[in-house]
Amino acid sequence: MPEIVEVPAKAFVALAESYISGEYRVYLIVERILSVKETFSCKEKGCGKPFDAWSPDTIHTVPRLEPTEAAVPRSYKCPKGHENTIYWLKGSSQRFIRKTD
């Protein structure tokens, strides 16, 4: 049964070498972690100050200003302290798969 192991980049080389020396077949799956930073304007009337909003995780990366059923709400404050809610939807990750023998 194949084993899926997720490791940090720093440990990858040592782990791959240990599997190869043990006569295992190694598959490398590289997944790009998408963390999104967007800049919005404050919705408070007369403010409009810009503020940065980061996606809550690597899954919910598409921002919306209006709520939807599947969205994850997050509150952010503009420089003047006004609260703004951004709704994050699931985005797509990019996965690259290559088999080596």
Image (tube, grey):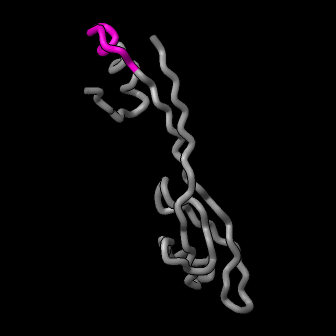
The quarter holding residue 76 reads bottom right
Residue 26 in the figure: left or right of residue 98: left
Image vertical order of residue 67 relative to residue 32, above or below: below
Front-most of residues 35 and 62: 62
Q: Residue furthest bottom?
A: 45
- Foreground residue among 29 and 43: 29
Please tell me which residue is depicted at 62% across the width and 82% down the height of the picture: 80
Could you say which is closer to the camera, residue 3 or residue 72? 3
Residue 24 among magenta residues: yes
What residue is drawn where x is 60% and y is 62%? 62
When asked about the image quadrant of residue 38, the answer is bottom right
Vertical placement of 30 versus 21: above or below? below
Magenta range is 18-26
Task: Identify the residue shown where x is 50% and y is 32%.
Answer: 30
Within the image, what quadrant is residue 82 found in? bottom right
Spot occupied by residue 22 in the image (x, y as percentages of width and height): 26, 9
Count every numbered label the image shows and give the total: 0
Q: x%, y% of residue 43?
A: 67, 84
